[in-house]
Amino acid sequence: MTDAELLVECKIGLGPQLTGTDFDDVLTQKLLAVKSFMTGAGVTATMMADDLAVGAIVTGVTDLWNVEGGVIKFSPVFYSFVSQLAISGQVLTVASVPLEAATAVAVTAQPVLTFSSRIKTYSVSLLEYDTQDSVAITLTLDVTGKVLTIAPDSNLSAATKYAIVISSAVSYSGPQLQYTVISFTTI
């Protein structure tokens, strides 16, 4: 939803006294302040664009509009909305190189897993797909805490299907990646 559309929603939320454009500049400032607060509280851009965020934004703008005794503050309802949106947007995902089902992967490959958030704990293994034999590997997590390199201790076998098995991965912000298998085949 665009800021112009959100402005209309805020005017509807504030009631019939704001049908004109007299207060659009002030409301737009409050709208931007609310969105900035929500982003700082961990609401992702994806969740911010979701229709569910509209209610939270309207509530926040209403809170800022209804100043009492010169004190500007958000309501407990707004804080609750923001917390729920922030948690909803926290999903741990992973991308891999090679990609799932890749073929013609070099036997010297060192697969790389890139997580959407910093991970604090993980359990990752590399198996020959058909035999389920474990491949000896060294795992290295980079300084960002998001990129995990899988270095086989020796070259992989040619024309063999492998599986990267992520038994668990937990991010610092809490979300977990469920059991995930990424397969690839060497040349």
Image: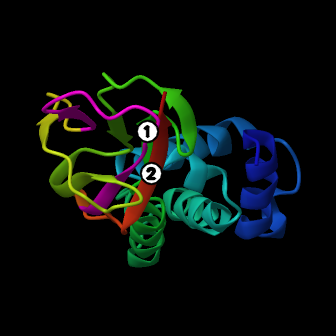
**Residue positioned 72% across, 58% down in the render:** 10
Give the percent coordinates (x, y) of residue 154. 17, 29
> Does residue 91 appear in this view?
no
> Which residues, given as a range, are shown in magenta?
146-168
In magenta stretch: residue 18: no
Circle 2 — which element?
strand
Q: Nearer the viewer, mark 1 or mark 2?
A: 2
Q: Nearer the viewer, residue 142 or 73?
A: 142
Amino acid type indicated by mark 1: Ser
Q: Earlier in the sequence, mark 1 or mark 2?
A: 1
**Residue positioned 45% across, 51% down in the render:** 182
**Residue positioned 19% across, 38% down in the render:** 145
Which residue is tagged 2? Answer: 182
Badges 1 and 2: C-beta atoms under 8 Å apart? Answer: yes
> Does residue 84 appear in this view?
yes
| Image position of 27 with respect to 76: above or below | above
Residue 157, quarter of picture? top left
Give the percent coordinates (x, y) of residue 49. 66, 50
Residue 109, quarter of picture? top left
Q: Main secondary structure of the magenta part?
A: strand
Which residue is tagged 1? Answer: 96
